């Protein structure tokens, strides 16, 4: 095989153009031309966006060893230098060729077919590598974020300005063939400047944009509580957050551990119960203004060693919304529920996608706490729901449980805005629409597959495609792609809007990738779905009427 490859390489060399010109001489080409270059004269690009090893390295090496390269390396030459540098991707292939030449001595791995492109700007080369790596896939979110911020610094230097705004950077990147939204650039900056110094292992292990967004939302909400309670300035909170993040840095990143630690830290500093901080944090994450001040002369201080003395959860009063049950349980915490006469009051409106409830409805005895979760996404993560027998025998409670499980599954996977509660019929919730189409450009294959297949599981548990059309469509907005697909019975529109994988990929793309918490919730949701139908059949109840 090696001899055959050598002969093939020699034939190609004979057919090739003359030897490559050297930088700094008058003969350096100023146009794009094919060339043959000795491997020793080509250097890897030192700003390569891929900072970790290519997971496909061994497969690519075996392929090049057996069949050669399927396309030439793209190279350029910096002004004043005598060696070439990889211009657009190809660092992995260059390293493989160098290894193969050292291992075999075969000239086919030494004299390499290349495509030479004239040098323009350093930023152009970096963006070319970024585009190429994106096309080939497998580039982690943090690698991409670091490359974008590197490009920003290069552009600032090339343009002779001190600071390039995110809006201007967005425009320049789009003009150069690499489109990123303003919001995504902001998330990348947060990941690099705030998170990378404290959780490098988690980021390098594949922590993606959805997780970074949730960490940032938690940061903002907790910071707001910290400052409102006069616990210190931003620098003090930054130090606390950095210490707590670093405590949990690792491949198996768990946001709930960080949240629990932040709640404990704030509760101890403010000398209030963890339950109080948890309720306040839930409200802030849901975008509501809150007032958790206690009545004059009363104090809600709880020592860290006190246990929950209440067998039931404390109803939290939400203006305009029915009572909501918030559990005193939370992973790793021992807390005390706030007594009824010290119930905190949350001022503000319910979430946009939650139904409005009149004052009369709020006092209706039929609005039991068991059905209350379908009114607002509050304290989802604090509700303990076990796999197996739900322990509930009425449809109201089971529907509320199904909504709670579906909402927190969706929230943790970046599609929480798609879940809407559905009271009094169906399975307790519906999906408002398909996932945002921009996710296909923002997520890597693994995460996009996970989110897409989770959406299909949620759609199945809500019976979006099998429920009576009139019952579902009436709950969807006119511009909803999901509504258009259902009304027109256009399966193609739905499949084109949500990545629809072969069902055989379910185990690989979803079951294996889900966190333990998500996996338990998914199983509980499917179990709750089955119980709803069993009770409906036993009582001869039509779920969708």
Image: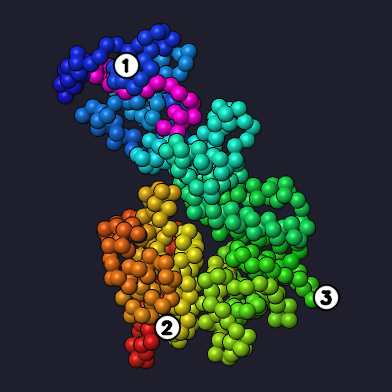
- The question of residue 109 being in magenta is answered with yes
Callout 2 touching callout 3 (CB < 8 Å): no
Q: Looking at the image, is mark 3 or mark 1 nearer the viewer?
A: 1
Which residue is at a point 37% across and 59% down the rendered structure image? 452
Q: Is residue 505 magenta?
A: no
Name the side, left or right, on which 335 lies relative to 256. right
Nearer to us in this view, 93 or 199: 93
Q: Which residues are magenta?
A: 101-129
Q: CA distance from mark 1 to mark 2?
A: 70 Å
| SS state under label 1 | strand
Residue sticking out furthest to the top = 25
Q: Quadrant of the C terminus?
A: bottom left
Helix or strand or loop: what does disc 2 sit on?
loop
Q: Is residue 102 visible?
A: no
First along the sequence among labels 2 and 3: 3
Give me the residue at 35% from left, 59% from top: 497
Task: From the top left corner, tell me how far across and down residue 458 is, in percent.
Answer: 39, 68
Does label 3 or label 1 sit earlier along the sequence?
Answer: 1
Q: Residue at x 39, y 40 (%)?
A: 134
The foreground one among 171 and 48 is 171
- Residue under label 2, please give it: 425
Residue 25, quarter of the rendered image? top left
Element type at mark 3:
loop
Q: Which residue is mark 3?
A: 296
Asked whether the residues under the numbered discs 1 and 2 touch, taking CB atoms below 8 Å apart as contact, a structural biologist would say no
Q: Which residue is at 64% across, 59% downward?
A: 221
Residue 75 image offset from top left, x and y in percent: 37, 23
User: How many residues crowd around disc 3 within 10 Å: few (fewer than 14), some, or many (20 or more)?
Assistant: few
Q: Which mark is residue 37?
A: 1
């Amino acid at each position: 095989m090696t001899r055959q490859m050598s002969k093939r390489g020699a034939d190609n060399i004979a057919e090739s153009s003359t030897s490559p010109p050297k930088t700094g001489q008058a003969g350096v080409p100023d146009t794009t031309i094919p060339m043959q270059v000795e491997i020793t004269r080509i250097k890897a690009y030192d700003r390569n966006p891929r900072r970790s090893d290519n997971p496909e390295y061994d497969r690519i090496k075996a392929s090049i060893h057996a069949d050669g390269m399927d396309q030439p390396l793209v190279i350029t030459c910096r002004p004043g230098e005598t060696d070439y540098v990889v211009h657009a991707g190809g660092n992995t292939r260059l390293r493989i060729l160098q290894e193969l030449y050292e291992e075999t001595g075969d000239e086919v791995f030494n004299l390499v077919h290349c495509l030479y492109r004239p040098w323009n700007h350093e930023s152009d080369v970096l963006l070319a590598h970024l585009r190429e790596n994106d096309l080939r896939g497998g580039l982690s979110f943090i690698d991409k974020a670091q490359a974008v911020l590197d490009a920003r610094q290069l552009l600032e230097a090339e343009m002779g300005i001190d600071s390039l705004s995110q809006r201007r950077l967005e425009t320049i990147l789009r003009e150069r063939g690499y489109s990123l939204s303003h919001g995504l650039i902001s998330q990348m900056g947060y990941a690099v400047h705030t998170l990378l110094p404290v959780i490098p292992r988690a980021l390098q292990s594949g922590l993606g944009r959805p997780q970074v967004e949730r960490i940032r939302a938690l940061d903002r909400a907790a910071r707001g509580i910290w400052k409102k309670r006069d616990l210190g300035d931003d620098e003090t909170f930054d130090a606390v957050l950095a210490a707590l993040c670093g405590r949990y840095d690792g491949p198996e990143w768990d946001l709930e551990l960080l949240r629990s630690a932040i709640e404990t830290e704030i509760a101890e500093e403010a000398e209030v119960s963890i339950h109080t901080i948890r309720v306040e944090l839930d409200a802030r994450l849901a975008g509501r203004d809150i007032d958790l001040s206690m009545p004059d002369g009363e104090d809600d201080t709880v020592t860290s060693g006190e246990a929950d003395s209440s067998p039931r959860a404390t109803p939290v009063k939400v203006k305009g919304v029915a009572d909501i049950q918030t559990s005193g349980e939370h992973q790793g915490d021992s807390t005390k529920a706030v007594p009824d006469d010290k119930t905190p009051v949350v001022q503000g409106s319910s979430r946009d996608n939650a139904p409005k409830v009149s004052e009369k409805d709020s006092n209706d005895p039929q609005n039991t706490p068991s059905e209350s979760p379908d009114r607002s996404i509050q304290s989802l993560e604090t509700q303990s729901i076990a796999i197996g027998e739900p322990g509930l025998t009425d449809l109201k409670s089971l529907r509320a449980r199904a909504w709670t499980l579906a909402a927190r599954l969706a929230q943790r996977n970046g599609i929480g805005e798609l879940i809407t509660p559905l009271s009094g019929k169906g399975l307790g919730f519906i999906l408002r629409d398909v996932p945002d189409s921009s996710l296909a450009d923002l997520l890597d294959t693994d995460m996009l597959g996970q989110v897409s297949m989770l959406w299909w599981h949620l759609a199945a548990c809500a019976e979006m495609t099998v429920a009576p059309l009139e019952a579902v469509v009436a709950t969807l907005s006119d511009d909803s792609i999901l509504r258009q697909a259902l009304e027109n019975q256009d399966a193609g529109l739905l499949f084109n809007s949500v990545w629809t994988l072969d069902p055989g990929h379910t185990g690989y793309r979803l079951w294996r990738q889900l966190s333990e918490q998500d996996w338990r919730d998914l199983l509980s949701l499917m179990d709750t779905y089955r119980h709803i139908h069993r009770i409906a059949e036993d009582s001869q109840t039509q779920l969708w009427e």
